[in-house]
Image (tube, rainbow, N blue to C red):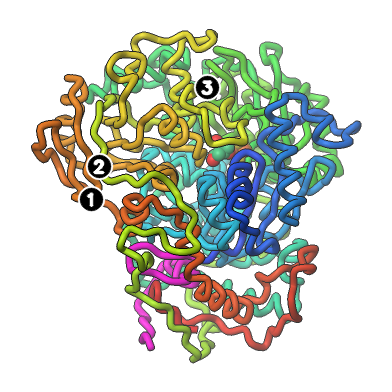
Amino acid sequence: MPSADTSPRTLYDKVFDDHVVFTDGQSTTLYIDRHLVHEVTSPQAFEGLRNANRTVRRPDCTLATVDHNVPTSSRKTYKNVSTFVEEEDSRLQCVTLEDNIKAFNLTYFGLGDDRQGIVHVIGPEQGFTLPGTTVVCGDSHTSTHGAFGALAFGIGTSEVEHVLATQTIITKKSKNMKIQIDGPLGPGVTSKDAVLHAIGMIGTAGGTGCVIEFCGSTVRSWSMEARMSVCNMSIEGGARAGMIAPDEITFEYLKNRPLAPKADSPEWEAAVKYWKSLRTDEGAQFDIEVYIDSRDIAPTVSWGTSPQDVVAITGKVPDPKDYEDETKRAGIERALEYMGLQPNTPMEEIMVDKVFIGSCTNSRIEDLRAAAKIVEGKKVASNIKRAMVVPGSGLIKKKAEAEGLDQIFSDAGFEWREAGCSMCLGMNPDILSPKERCASTSNRNFEGRQGAGGRTHLMSPVMAAAAAVTGHLADIRKLEGFEGAFTVVAVTDKAQVSVGTDHETDESTDEYDDKTLDIPVGENLHPQDDGTTPSGAAAGFPPFTTLKGIVAPLNRSNVDTDAIIPKQYLKTIKRTGLGVALFDQWRYQPNTDHEENPDFVLNQEPYRAAKIMVVTGPNFGCGSSREHAPWALLDFGIKCIIAPSFADIFFNNTFKNGMLPIAIDDAAVIARIAELAADKQEIEVDLVKQEIRTASGEVISTFEVEEFRKHCLVNGLDDIGLTMQHEDRILRYENKRSTLYPWLEGVGYMAKYRKEPVKVEAVRVPRAGRSGQLDW
Ligand SMILES: CC(C)[C@H](C(=O)O)[C@@H](O)C(=O)O
Ligand code: SF4
């Protein structure tokens, strides 16, 4: 029996440890409590299930909605998605989701349902998201749910399929990072400003490989809505997830939510007892620590094409001349050209064309209340072509209407829309025209994000409201009467009860059960190392052993997945045929039908036939979780990417498609490979020996790869089949889960899935254990 290790643990360690089904010490199979599904990243996953004759393992833990593609126009005449969604490809994705929901018998909020909305808004709103749970979704902003002390992260479509089939995911433990913010925020400064400020400090790759815990007195004082905005954007700081320890504010928010345990029932009491144990122990170690003094945070806006390109509203557009580093200077020049900005322009002088208040970052009731206070009695400036408010869910819309917010916005000249992702990424008709400039409460300002050639400035809801009424980026603090407006900003949907502190120990959590569940550690996750496909495993991909070919060089940093494949290509329900879409904005002339830009490397010989790509800058594949990015690369013919570093979700997604991403942090090695690439020479990647060689066989470098991933690639294995070989362990975990955390079994309108009455007296808080050594 493993002995209990009582060394201090972080919040992340605790939630991770409590979900280990089994581990080989490197790769861990983690149980997933909550799975959210939307129309863009699920069609291929359901197709995979169908092809392999698989079912959804836990329909009671799965919740689906349509959000990305849906029109935000009035639904007064709504009958069904087939007649309501005008664009053919968007309609196909919505209809396909509805077909899949019926076929697999899942809970679904469609367009005729008030509960429909952005997936990251409705999960918390329904109480589907609970403290201490693992939450996944085929969407990078799943990090939002970490505001509840859940371990919540975005996954790719292959992983969506894995979770649907097995209710688990194969993952690696991340590092612990802490961002502590202390002190009161100044007037006009919100949690959105805090997170933009933090990303400006750490950069979009700052949190790569980490789970961030946000803590400190500033964080503790925030409402759940404010916390969600911050965790939402942890992905923009490169982190796998963001988390905030649950406290009385969390519990109060969850009371009486339809899918949370019934308030004040024995089950609720048991849940709260467990939730209170979910805080970082005194003395726990973080790998990276960042401290922010709240006084340093001003209302913050972005100036460039990456969420790290931020500045205080009182600041100026940066001048590339001030940067010695050549790559950095070139990056700023490119961003300023795209954004149509002159160096040293005061931010407050930048005129705006459109205003968007919405997205999973800032479309909740508190955001709308705050923005409404700013625009009340004022008019949208005459140069603003369109200002829109898009509530995050039908229920938020209703609530706002009951409070008269819709009227305030409409009187001021805003459009009051229906719920959806809308202009955050413009998969529906809400888009910017080329060169239009938008003050936006969303989370990404990538090139073309809100429409081809569109220019996005990220900011808080009150700052967007201020931009709307002044017609330019404006300092909210200079707006007449703004202080009165600010009294509402920190008011959450429910009354705040008490404000705790971090790292607090709670005596009521000392009661442990001595029963121990032995979780096998150090066992091989892939028992058949002879290269044969184990029974039950569907044959996956052609095996990857060695790959020899031309290398295409790409001299860029922070290449986001919107750049690898823009949103217009995400409307497919297939995995194939996306090669044509690869690097669309760089590869083709603007506003043409795929007329090639001769300057782009993949339009030149011999790179049209490249099998490998070398990227000289770090953080390749950041941003969205779209698996369409590796699908496009693969369809083009590129099977291996070598770069200094990768964003986590993209890195996972490539492996799931039989591709090999190689991270090499030795700049000299990257430079050598880039030189060979520029010389049009072939190289050879040998996965078996973990070597990169020149065409003549000289070893350029060795590389690291996780054992389990290597095994799957070399043998072309589908890891769903491998996981299902361990079904007994999953079952065992599930049995324990229903005893220890009965509130996670189908509740509320999911009660139809409950097999037997809940035995709350059995509930015990699991004892502190290490990953793979759970003591119950
Ligand atoms: C469509 C989806 C894959 C994507 C994401 O993962 O983030 C989207 O929500 C986005 O914001 O770009
Ligand atoms: S970031 Fe935008 S597109 Fe992505 S889930 Fe949130 S609202 Fe939707």
Spatial separation of the CA atoms under disc 3 and disc 2: 36 Å
**Circle 2 residue:** 546
Q: For the residue marked with disc 3, what is the amino acid?
A: Gly
Neighbor class of circle 3 (other Cα within 10 Å; few <14, some 14-19, many 20+) is: many
Mark 3 CB near ligand 1 (8 Å cut): no
Q: For ligand 1, tell me if the residue under mark 2 lies within 8 Å.
A: no
Neighbour tally class for label 2: few under 14, some 14-19, many 20 plus, Cα within 10 Å:
some
Q: Which numbered disc flags the more N-terminal residue, 1 or 3?
A: 3
Q: Which residue is mark 1?
A: 688
Q: Residue at x 86, y 44 (%)?
A: 402
Q: Nearer the viewer, residue 35 or 351?
A: 35
Judged by depth in the image, the label closer to the viewer, 3 or 2, is 2
| On screen, residue 458 above or below 209 | above
* CB-based contact (under 8 Å), mark 2 and mark 1: yes
Q: Residue at x 80, y 28 (%)?
A: 73
User: Magenta span covers which residues?
Assistant: 1-30
Q: Position of residue 617 (x, y in %)?
A: 28, 31
Which numbered disc, 3 or 2, marks the residue that appears first in the sequence? 3
Numbered disc 3: secondary structure: loop
Tell me residue 601's x, y (percent).
32, 17
Instruction: Name which of mark 2 and mark 1 comes first in the sequence.
Output: 2
In the image, is 415 to the left or to the right of 247?
right
Labels 1, 3: front one: 1
Query: Which of the labelled discs sits on residue 448, or is there none?
Result: 3
